[in-house]
């Protein structure tokens, strides 16, 4: 008898627990998983934004993407997205680690400076992109003015094929550096002083301490930053839209921007869906690989 | 913790108060346009003179391609967020008429007795014998030059390509270190219509109705090489990329560019800004080549979305008719520099007054018959991208010339095939 | 001792210098907004405006409904924050303290959503939202961005660290399960919850991609989109009107500064800890 009540109570409890997750699950079902299925369906049609009709055309759009004219742009967008991601991750980590070592004192002035340094992440990206557009301007930009003070010739930051992507990455690094600093700071605080003191007794200098002790102990933090930065930089859109629109010569045409252009500028919803679906598969693969790799290689002891 | 709780209460109250789902009501006749900020006041004035101005909401919605995107997007919804009247570029209208995006205006033209005689470019906006849009703006690629400097230094803008070299050397000013202080000519390479004349005047076909292009012909290569030489010598500036347009204007107004290529619609803007800096603006047509003396012309028509609520279409057409009428024609021309929509517009009182005030514009009106429309292809924007990128790579990034030109021709043919 | 003091001074100097470089673009935004057009276009830029001119503010506020943009952003962000906080807390509870068959499998589905951004799935969502007639509406802006797998993940990690005995004690006290989530679990994980709210706020406030898809009218425009559109409306005259663009940006930054003042403590410390758990 009492076992039955216990069971019923347990069933009620797990029903409650499940119900708690339902609101979120409904939102994910409608706005994440259903769209993926629908994306695949649209990719099998010939849907053009200016026509109301959709006809099934089989794998024609995938043929266009893999064996037709879509291929070269697809590959190049994938490369650019990869380069951008690599650049943003590297800059974020480097800036973050450097700033964390510079701004680590606990005085009021340093506290204020930390606030100032993380500000860029909190101002609207629209605003900060436009400020950088102005700083990067060929003729009136302050960056080129500084270069001229140093006796260097001006750089066409956003309009030359060699520097446009780099300028975008620099902007993102500036935005995210302070945030990475915060996260590193709290992780460094967590490193037991014993480790560092022991190293000092062994006669290790600052650099050795950093490379031999801090970096390995900071590995989980670095992994966390790497994964979150990758997630955000794979979907970069806003700064590209404002600063370069994918140009010059499509050198900043990241994947998301390319899909957006296909859908809303060329009005080819069908091709955009096919490309979007493939990009989704790539993200999926990437996630699976990262998870496996990180489980194996990063120790979470610290 | 207190501020957090307060903020939460505030956020919750906000969310409930606004009911989350409030839609935004619009004026009866919504007019989307492409005229940038500097024309806001004048365009507002023009609409205010319309007899039902109180019903009209005017909204700037970005460039014409963005407007099209928004209209097509609203179509997916079934038409509730559509504007009543919106501009369509001359290169797009036939596709849109075919796909049933824009309304056939014939019944309205008949009902309201609209007079289309002498309306320029009206055939461009017709499809299978029916009118789908009325001519709203026409703009031709023209040359604006610094007339004050021209008179001071005795520089004449070249009438033919043969005079170019001498002109470029004469009008360019160099600094002591060899950099250019004043460019003789500034060509905006970011839009193909600014440079198609270079090819058309020598009989080179940028692209025809079948997707063919002779951009890699010997003649084309010869001209491109010549231009490249002038660019490398610091005589011509080839504009490209973000801020390009902004920088060109500023250079022209500061006397750092002698002549620039721009759409005629920018005339008033240059006129006013140059005047405030003590310069006069001269207007000319691009130099003639060995086969022609043409320049690209294009325009926008005003259209009504086919999916617009039926009850709104009559009001929409009346506004459209007003905006495209002879009454507004010269007014638009004088606050912008758009070419008049009616071939006899310059013979009217208002037209004569316009030319008396802006005599330089007569140089353009004399050449209207020679101006050429680009071909209409569904993939034309993508094709122009190829031309713009290709030339910029040659001129600014020192890409291999013949290889790039060959690549451009292949790309154009490919894009054409792809769009079938 | 003096050597140590010298090093401290050197470090402070270096840090100050780096900070100045980092905030220079923001400083440039503020002073450009107070410059006249002529001063904006000087060939030698001025690092302090010659006069503090507020014309740019006046112009941009008279020609563009900047406050309407701000209001729209506020409403949309509030909606996103509210729905996201509520659903995330509940779901995080379910996935940490709760137990039901298939919990881990369902949780993997939630984690998977983290890697599927709206920038990939926007076409079907776009069609869905517009068929509902939700273009240019608050609800159309809020719903697709309301759920966040990242928030759930973050809160779950934090809830997991809370000992079960607290929840059991609450039960003995006669507190229902639902109430004990909000009266025991949430207060115990306050820094993480606050951090999650701040993150949701920042993301909602910054949202650009999705609003760009579904907004076509000035009345529905949010501030992130509004600023970009103000720049677009100057088209090729942007250099001349940089002061107005920057003025609008400065106005848009004010609410964020307020947020900073209120939550500085959490942003500086709680943040990082929560994110790392």
Image (cartoon, coloured by chain):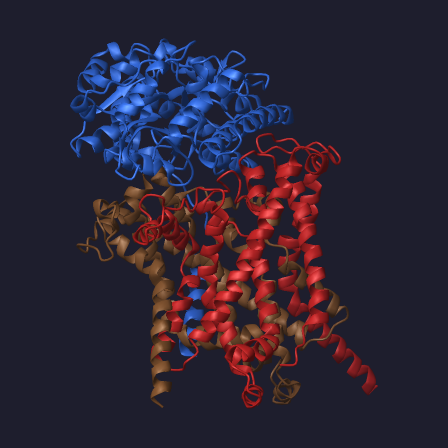
Q: Is residue A144 left or right of residue B219?
A: left
Residue at (59, 64) in percent of width and height: A226
Q: What quarter of the picture does the C terminus of chain B occupy?
A: top right
Q: How many marks?
A: 0
Residue B320 percent coordinates (x, y): 38, 24
- Residue C232 in view: yes
Residue A172 percent coordinates (x, y): 48, 57
Q: What quarter of the picture does the N terminus of chain B occupy?
A: bottom left
Q: Quadrant of residue C260?
A: bottom left
User: Which one of the lettered chains is coloured red?
Assistant: A
Q: Quadrant of residue B5?
A: bottom left
Would you place residue A63 above or below residue A226 in this image?
above
Task: From the image, state the color of chain B.
Answer: blue
Of B162 and B287, nearer the camera is B162
Q: Residue furthest front?
A: B177
Would you place residue A211 above or below residue B402 in this image?
below
Q: Quadrant of residue C157?
A: bottom right
Would you place residue A127 above or below residue B354 in this image?
below
Q: Is residue C112 left or right of residue A140?
A: right
Task: From the image, state the color of chain C.
Answer: brown
Q: Is residue B74 left or right of residue B37?
A: right
Residue A170 percent coordinates (x, y): 46, 56
Residue C20 percent coordinates (x, y): 34, 66
Would you place residue A118 above or below residue B295 in this image?
below
Residue at (19, 26) in percent of width and height: B149
- Residue C131 in view: no
């Amino acid at each position: 008898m009492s076992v039955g009540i216990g069971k019923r109570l347990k069933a009620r409890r797990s029903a409650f627990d499940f119900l708690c997750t339902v609101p979120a699950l409904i939102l994910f079902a409608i706005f994440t998983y259903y769209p993926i299925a629908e994306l695949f369906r649209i990719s099998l049609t010939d849907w053009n934004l200016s026509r109301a009709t959709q006809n099934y055309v089989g794998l024609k759009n995938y043929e266009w993407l893999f064996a037709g004219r879509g291929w070269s742009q697809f590959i190049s967008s994938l490369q650019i997205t990869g380069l951008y991601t690599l650049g943003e991750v590297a800059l974020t980590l480097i800036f973050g680690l450097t700033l964390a070592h510079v701004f680590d004192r606990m005085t009021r002035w340093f506290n204020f400076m930390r606030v100032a340094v993380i500000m860029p992440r909190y101002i609207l990206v629209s605003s900060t992109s436009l400020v950088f557009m102005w700083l990067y301007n060929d003729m009136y930009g302050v960056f080129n003015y500084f270069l001229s003070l140093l006796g260097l010739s001006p750089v066409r930051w956003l309009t030359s094929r060699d520097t446009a992507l780099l300028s975008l990455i620099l902007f993102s690094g500036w935005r995210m550096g302070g945030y990475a600093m915060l996260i590193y700071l709290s992780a460094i605080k967590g490193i037991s002083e014993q480790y560092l003191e022991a190293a000092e007794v062994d006669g290790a200098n600052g650099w050795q301490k950093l490379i031999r002790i801090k970096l390995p102990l900071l590995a989980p933090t670095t992994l966390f930053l790497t994964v979150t930065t990758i997630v955000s930089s794979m979907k970069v859109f806003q700064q590209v839209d404002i600063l370069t629109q994918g140009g010059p010569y499509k050198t900043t045409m990241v994947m998301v921007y390319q899909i957006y252009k296909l859908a809303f500028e060329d009005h080819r919803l069908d091709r955009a869906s096919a490309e979007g679906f493939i990009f989704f598969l790539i993200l999926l693969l990437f996630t699976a690989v990262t998870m496996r790799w990180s489980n194996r290689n990063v120790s979470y002891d610290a | 913790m207190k501020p957090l709780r307060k903020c939460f209460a505030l956020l919750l109250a906000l969310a409930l108060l606004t009911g989350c789902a409030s839609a935004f009501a619009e004026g009866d006749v919504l007019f989307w346009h492409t005229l940038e900020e500097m024309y806001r006041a004048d365009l507002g004035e023009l609409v205010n003179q319309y007899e039902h101005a109180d019903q009209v909401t005017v909204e700037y919605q970005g460039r014409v391609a963005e407007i099209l995107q928004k209209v097509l997007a609203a179509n997916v919804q079934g038409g509730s967020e559509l504007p009543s009247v919106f501009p369509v570029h001359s290169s797009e209208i036939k596709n849109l008429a075919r796909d049933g995006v824009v309304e056939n205006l014939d019944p309205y033209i008949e009902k309201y007795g609209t007079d289309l005689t002498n309306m320029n470019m009206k055939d461009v906006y017709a499809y299978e014998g029916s009118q789908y849009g009325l001519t709203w703006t026409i703009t031709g690629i023209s040359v604006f030059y610094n007339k004050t400097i021209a008179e001071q230094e005795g520089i004449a803008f070249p009438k033919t390509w043969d005079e170019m070299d001498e002109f470029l050397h004469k009008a360019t000013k160099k600094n002591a270190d060899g950099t250019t202080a004043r460019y003789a000519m500034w060509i905006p390479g970011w839009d193909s219509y600014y440079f198609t004349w270079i090819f058309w005047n020598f009989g080179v076909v940028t692209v025809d109705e079948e997707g063919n292009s002779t951009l890699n012909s010997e003649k084309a290569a010869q001209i491109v090489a010549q231009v490249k030489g002038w660019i490398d010598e610091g005589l011509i500036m080839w504009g490209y990329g973000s801020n390009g347009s902004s920088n060109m204007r500023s250079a022209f107004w500061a006397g750092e560019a002698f002549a620039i290529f721009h759409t005629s619609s920018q005339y008033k803007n240059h006129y006013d800004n140059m005047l405030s800096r003590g310069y006069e603006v001269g207007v000319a047509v691009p130099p003639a080549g060995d086969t022609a003396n043409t320049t690209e012309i294009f325009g926008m028509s005003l259209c009504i979305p086919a999916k617009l609520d039926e009850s709104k279409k009559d009001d929409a057409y009346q506004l459209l008719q007003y905006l495209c009428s002879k009454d507004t024609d010269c007014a638009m021309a004088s606050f912008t520099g758009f070419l008049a929509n009616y071939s006899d517009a310059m013979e009217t009182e208002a037209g004569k007054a316009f030319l008396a005030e802006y005599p330089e514009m007569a140089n353009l009106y004399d050449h209207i018959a020679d101006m050429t429309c680009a071909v209409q292809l569904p993939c034309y924007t993508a094709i122009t991208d190829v031309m713009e990128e290709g030339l910029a790579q040659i001129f600014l990034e020192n890409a291999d010339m013949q290889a790039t030109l060959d690549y451009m021709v292949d790309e154009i043919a490919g894009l054409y095939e792809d769009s079938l | 001792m003096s050597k140590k003091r010298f090093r401290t001074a050197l470090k402070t100097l270096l840090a100050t210098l780096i900070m100045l470089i980092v905030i220079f673009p923001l400083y440039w935004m503020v002073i450009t907004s107070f410059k006249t057009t002529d001063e904006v276009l000087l060939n030698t830029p001025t690092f302090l405006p010659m006069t503090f001119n507020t014309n740019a503010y006046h112009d941009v506020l008279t020609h563009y409904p900047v406050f309407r943009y701000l209001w729209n952003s506020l409403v949309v962000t509030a909606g996103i924050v509210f729905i996201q906080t509520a659903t995330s807390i509940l779901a995080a509870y379910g996935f940490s303290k709760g137990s039901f068959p298939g919990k881990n499998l369902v949780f993997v589905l939630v984690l998977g959503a983290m890697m599927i951004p709206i920038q990939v799935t926007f076409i079907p969502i776009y069609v869905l939202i517009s068929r509902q007639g939700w273009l240019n509406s608050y609800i159309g802006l809020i719903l697709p961005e309301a759920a966040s797998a990242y928030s759930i993940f973050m809160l779950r990690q934090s809830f997991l660290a809370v000992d079960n005995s607290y929840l059991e004690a609450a039960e003995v006290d006669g507190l229902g399960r639902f109430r004990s989530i909000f009266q025991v679990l949430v207060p115990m994980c306050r820094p993480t919850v606050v951090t999650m709210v701040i993150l949701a706020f920042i993301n909602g406030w910054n949202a650009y991609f999705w609003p760009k898809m579904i907004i076509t009218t000035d009345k529905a425009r949010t501030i992130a989109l509004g600023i970009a559109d103000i720049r677009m409306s100057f088209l090729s005259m942007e250099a001349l009107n940089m002061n107005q663009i920057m003025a609008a940006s400065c106005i848009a930054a004010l609410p964020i500064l307020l947020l900073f003042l209120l939550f500085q403590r959490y942003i500086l410390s709680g943040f990082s800890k929560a994110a790392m758990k």
